[in-house]
Amino acid sequence: MQAYRGKTIEEVIQLLAKYKGKVIAGGTDLIIDLRNGKLTSDTLIDISSIEELRRVEEYDETINIGAATTFTQIIENPLFQENLYGLKRACNTVGSPQIRNKGTIGGNIANGSPAADSIPPLLCLDSIIVLESIKGKREIGLEDYYKDNISIKEDELIISVQFKKPDKGQILSFAKLGLRKALAISRLSIATLLELDENNKVKTIKIASGSLGRYPMREPIVEEFLLGRELTVDVTDKAVKVLQQVMGERLGGRSTLPYKRIAVERIFKEALGDGLKRLKGVEIW
Amino acid sequence: MKKRGRGIGLSFYGTGYGNGFPDASKAKVKLLKDGKVGIYVGGTEVGQGAKTVLSQIGSETLKLPLDKIIFISEDTSLMPDSGTAAASRQTYNTGNAIKIACENFKNRLREAAREQLKLNAIHGLTVEKGEIYLEFFPQKRISFKELSKIYGDDNIEAEGEFIAQTIEMDPETGQGAPYWPYTFNACGVELEVDTITGLVEIERAVFAQDVGRAINPHLVEGQMDGGFAMALGYVLFEDLKLEKGKIYNNKFSKYLIPTAMDMIQIENIIVEEPEYTAPFGAKGIGEPVMIPVGPAILNAIYDAIGVRITELPVTPERLIKAIEEDGKKKEEI
């Protein structure tokens, strides 16, 4: 086993081209794999000291989060206090303070877990990931990345995740079901991006789920159902039924389905209700 | 829906091995060269506070400040056996042995003092604060330090042994009095059950524990908090997922124990009713502090949702299943 500490992105992509090594940032998943003998590569390339990869940058229309930015950095960044609050909340439910101090958003993506907490909010934001190798830069949609079966080439480095800033009236929310209050792998999670029109009807709705399939994914059928409707108790209950139907088809036969099908109601309503509460300033349900 | 419930659990529990099983603790006490006193017991400190409490019992019996006591419990070449750190027995059994050993040691000190002070007998000699003096003529006194200079550090020592009184139960009838003494406790819990996710949230817990006498109240509370946390784990979280002899939850990412975030502040009440056979009245509470918590939680769940849980742990998934099955049963009726 050999390990390199990259000082620049350029150096890292050269190393990747040469060794096809495994990139390490926080190591919160990788070190466990290493100890369990599950690591296939015998070269580690540490990117945790590259400042360029460890920061959140705000532009006029977009936000760019460097791949080696830790969850703690995101939680503490004022950019995620207001309508991007759902991303902060998701990052805040990752593991424990120690894991949040080390674990990175790029690692959450690269690891490809269906339970990755930070992914559903990023999916609601239609995020793209920026990859770089010696052949150049390329961008792929986060959703496509999962659909294409975790499609990072072995000489590519995740540089950042980017998304368009939501409008002021759009609220990103997140809710998670974990079996304890810290260090809990998500049993299921829901993120929503919600905007209402002047008649209180749903103008924009994006919904993404975690742990309800092989990977975190958008829930277009539920989105479609809610679009243009007022979020009354009845409509919300019906949306839950739609989601239950969709996940039932997707997870059919899995032993975890009966429980998740019931529990999803609480988490879905919590995420959506939180968005509604933040938009209207009152508790709805 | 979120439903609230309250429940109480009670228990009583015997200290020591019980049931006629030989249950003996030994202790050794020795004057060391700098006038300090060494206490040697084979009673293991496993985090429960044995070293602290047993030192306190020695200190109290010898009327000697704690900083003058060297307590050693890790080196079997130096000490007699004091039995296992199990059965909630160290404070009571080894505490008693230390108390007896310290009393014997005080008599050895009085003998040495009589010799050095050229007295006729040992009566009237008080042992206190590292000195031995004649009560009605306090000018006649000698310190531990002086004695240790004269006798060296291997000559004034004493042992003590405590054998617990326990009786084997009648094997035919199962009747008898297997333990002495017993401790008593009660735990009350208020909680909220989420009938959609199956999550149980403990909101308040009050816990009363009879200890005979709290040698160290802070440590007693630590034991009570610890017992509650452990019970919380086995009632709501810890699932081996044992299927056909195979443990599926074989790592701590799957076998969940409560974190500090899952624990709540327990309202602890220490009940003191000194036990006459115990060292300064103190009984063992190591195990009892876990026992009433489970029943209290399960009773509170029943109070909240009207469903009796008969299999532990009550994981969210199991709770939802139990609610569903109960609903079906009620529909059939």
Image: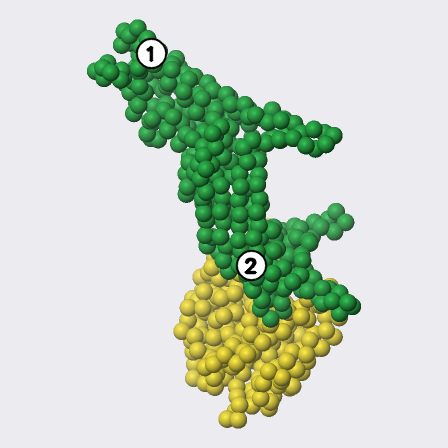
Chain of the residue under label 1? B
Q: Secondary structure at mark 1?
A: loop
Q: Residue at x 52, y 65 (%)?
A: A93
| Residue B19 quadrant | top right
- Which residue is nearer to you in this view: B166 or A260? B166
Residue B56, relative to residue B223: is it above or below? above
Label 2 Cα neighbours within 10 Å, binned few <14 / some 14-19 / many ≥20: many
Q: Secondary structure at mark 2?
A: strand
Q: Residue at x 31, y 19 (%)?
A: B126
Q: Which chain is green?
A: B
The type of residue carrying mark 1 is Ile
Q: Identify the mark at residue B6; answer none if there is no mark.
A: 2
- Which residue is nearer to you in this view: A57 or B94? B94
Mark 1 = which residue? B122
Residue B327, relative to residue B44: is it above or below? below
Q: Residue at x 62, y 84 (%)?
A: A234
Q: Are marks 1 and 2 on the same chain?
A: yes
| Quadrant of the frame with the C terminus of chain B | bottom right
Q: Position of residue A189 (x, y in %)?
A: 59, 70
Q: Position of residue B71 (x, y in %)?
A: 41, 28
Query: Pointers 1 and 2 in contact (CB under 8 A)?
Result: no
Q: Colour of chain A?
A: yellow
